[in-house]
């Protein structure tokens, strides 16, 4: 349906603009009408390419947020269609069912993220210094780590219905700690420490290294950190999902609204 219906592409472009353009325009406004304040940003961020810095940050937040939520959306769809109980009785592991469905949805969100980034680039035409190998590695590990975090979170949604709202707020808050529109060095020390434990921070850092700074080593470091986070969130999420799933079924809440 998304490929056939032209209006969905139009909405996608409009959504990309309404979500990302305000952040980029805000960055331009803070630089001043003659970019007199851009030097102060460059001192903190290590680059005067503040438009690309902000554009990558907001696209990362939108893409990672929707990718992480794709697991919970897959769960909600099964529940709303009344097929969750049937799916839970198959021999296929439940986390595999959710991850497979979520991956298909997340691929669509990835395409939307590409459209979002290209739309911004066409409008403001910021410069890019691309490291192709680093870019591909960061994108792949970002996608996998986002699915792993989604599995970590979905157990709470399965057991506690109000958790989806709290998770949404937490994901928006992570944008502050990850330095979506500014370098994390302007944050207090404790906020920087918390931000370093979030995958979105390393995704934004890796993509900026691969697209803005032209730093291959930085992109490879972000890739390694994201792989480690994928392992941690994947293992812990698998264990936590199993416990919360059993608690949900014991209480008869699997398909309750």
Image (spheres, helix red, strand yellow):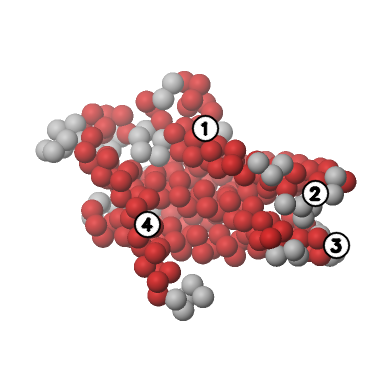
Residue 242: give its label: none
Whichever of callouts 2 and 3 sits on the residue coming sooner in the sequence is 3
| Spatial CA span between label 1 and label 4 | 27 Å
Residue 196: give its label: 1
Residue at figure coordinates x 37%, y 50% from the top left: 19
* Of 130 and 183, the residue lying toward us: 183
Rate crowding at label 4 as few (under 14), some (14 to 19) or many (20 or more) other CA atoms within 10 Å.
Answer: many
The residue that disc 2 covers is 253
| Spatial CA span between label 3 and label 4 | 39 Å
Q: State the image quarter where residue 24 is shown.
A: top left
Residue 158 at x, y percent in the picture? 73, 48
SS at mark 3 in the image? loop
Q: Is residue 163 left or right of residue 12?
A: right
| Spatial CA span between label 2 and label 4 | 37 Å
Q: Is residue 150 visible?
A: yes
The residue that disc 4 covers is 16
Q: Is residue 65 left or right of residue 93?
A: left
Rate crowding at label 2 as few (under 14), some (14 to 19) or many (20 or more) other CA atoms within 10 Å.
Answer: some
| Spatial CA span between label 1 and label 3 | 39 Å
The residue that disc 3 covers is 89
């Amino acid at each position: 349906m998304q490929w056939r219906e032209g209006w969905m592409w139009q909405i996608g472009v409009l959504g990309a603009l309404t979500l990302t353009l305000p952040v980029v325009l805000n960055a331009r406004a803070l630089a001043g009408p003659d970019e007199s304040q851009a030097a102060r940003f460059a001192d903190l961020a290590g680059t005067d390419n503040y438009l690309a810095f902000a554009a990558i940050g907001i696209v990362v937040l939108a893409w990672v947020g929707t990718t992480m939520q794709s697991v919970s959306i897959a769960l909600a769809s099964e529940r709303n269609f009344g097929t969750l109980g049937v799916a839970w009785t198959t021999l296929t592991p439940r986390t595999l069912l959710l991850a497979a469905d979520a991956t298909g949805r997340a691929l669509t969100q990835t395409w939307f993220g590409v459209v979002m980034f290209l739309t911004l680039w066409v409008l403001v035409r910021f410069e890019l210094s691309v490291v192709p190998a680093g870019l591909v590695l960061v994108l792949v590990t970002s996608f996998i780590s986002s699915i792993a975090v989604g599995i970590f979170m979905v157990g709470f949604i399965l057991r506690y219905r109000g958790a989806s709202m709290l998770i949404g707020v937490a994901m928006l808050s992570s944008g502050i700690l990850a330095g979506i529109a500014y370098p994390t060095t302007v944050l207090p020390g404790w906020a920087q420490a918390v931000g370093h434990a979030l995958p979105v921070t390393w995704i934004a850092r890796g993509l900026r290294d691969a697209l803005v700074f032209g730093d291959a080593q930085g992109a490879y470091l972000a890739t390694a950190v994201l792989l480690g986070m994928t392992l941690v969130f994947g293992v812990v999420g698998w264990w936590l999902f199993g416990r919360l799933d059993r608690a949900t079924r014991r209480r008869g809440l699997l398909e309750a609204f």
